[in-house]
Amino acid sequence: MQWQFSNDAPIYTQLIQQVKVGIVTGAFPPGERLPSVRDLATEAGVNPNTMQRALAELERDGLVYSQRTAGRFVTEDNTMINQAKRSLAERHVKTFLEAMLRLGFQRDEIITLITQELGEEEADHASA
């Protein structure tokens, strides 16, 4: 998994989001055992305590669960995974819309831009 961090949010919240993305995209498939806290922390280049905090939060949210001696696993509850996917998408849409409104775009202009971009993307995929 590719880990990327910015200065605009605490590292542990960014870890939570990135692991969620890994879960909803299938990088961490349902039912799969997650690497150990230490291994994930080393891979991400963060303190193991920070990774532990992020995974504990994901466990409270129900996206991962612990088995005493076997480690942490991704939930097999597809409804829970789809809810997390929807939540991530809504956050991205909200951020996008706030940025477009700050730029001075009106609702209809935003819809037109999105429609045009989707049309260009479909055309690119059709010609590929």
Image: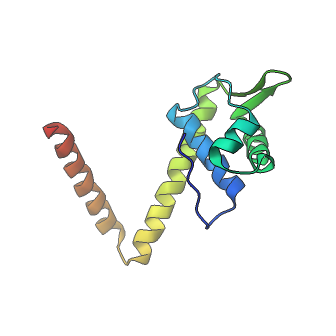
48 or 114: which is nearer to us?
A: 48
Q: Using the image as rendered, state which of residue 118 and residue 128 is in the foreground.
A: 128
Position of residue 87 in the picture relative to residue 48 (left or right): left
Percent x, y of residue 72: 75, 29
Q: Which quadrant is the C terminus positioned in?
A: top left
Q: Is residue 32 above or below residue 12?
A: above
- Residue visible at 18% across and 45% down? 124
Residue situated in front as seen by the camera: 33 or 64: 33
Question: Is 111 displayed left or right of 58 in the figure?
Answer: left
Q: Is residue 112 above or below residue 53?
A: below
Indicate how the structure is coloured in the image.
rainbow
Q: Residue at x 26, y 50 (%)?
A: 118
Q: Position of residue 68 (x, y in %)?
A: 86, 23
Where's residue 19, x and y in %? 62, 42
In front of the other: 57 or 2? 2
Total marks shown come to 0
Residue 95, how many percent across, how many down?
Answer: 50, 63
In the displayed structure image, the side of residue 109 where residue 58 appears, left or right: right
Kindly identify the residue that appears in the image at 74 percent across and 46 percent down.
Answer: 51
